[in-house]
Amino acid sequence: MEPKQNKTLGETLLEVRTQNGKTQVGLAAALSHFVGFSQGRISRLERGLWTPDAGQFEQLIAALECTEQQARELRQAASINAQRRANVA
């Protein structure tokens, strides 16, 4: 996976999720022990309508069973997402 500055967090998550053979439902099930995750919330995240807090984000990375490269790309996309949100506010 090649890092791209213009890729959103949702796009990156969708790419990693599908590469790792996870469905939204399966990912939500893997996160069922962690409050705040559902298939609908994962869908909203992929569409850019919701952003997890830092703890939720790390649980998401663990549930995705990411490679180090994938985790790095997700964190980079999350950082860019936070910067974009700060510039809007």
Image (cartoon, helix red, strand yellow):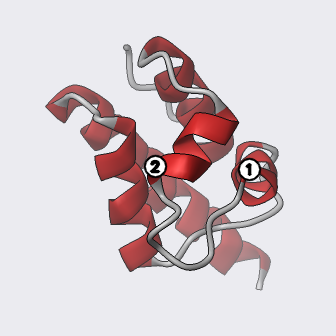
- Write down the residue under mark 2: 30
Instruction: Looking at the picture, tell me which residue is in the foreground, 4 or 31.
Output: 31
Q: From the viewer's perspective, is residue 24 above or below residue 33?
A: above
Q: From the viewer's perspective, is residue 36 above or below residue 11?
A: below
Q: Is residue 22 visible?
A: yes
Percent position of residue 8, x then y: 64, 41
Question: Type of residue at label 2?
Answer: Ala
Instruction: Looking at the picture, tell me which residue is in the foreground, 46 or 39.
Output: 39
Return the disc, 1 or 2, that comes first in the chain's sequence: 2
Describe the element under mark 2 as helix, strand or loop: helix
The residue shown at (75%, 66%) is 50
**Residue 39 disc label:** 1
Determine whether, in the image, residue 45 is placed left or right of residue 1. right
Of all residues, the one furthest to the bottom in this rendering is 89
Q: From the viewer's perspective, is residue 73 above or below residue 53?
A: above
Q: Quadrant of the C terminus?
A: bottom right
The residue shown at (65%, 67%) is 51
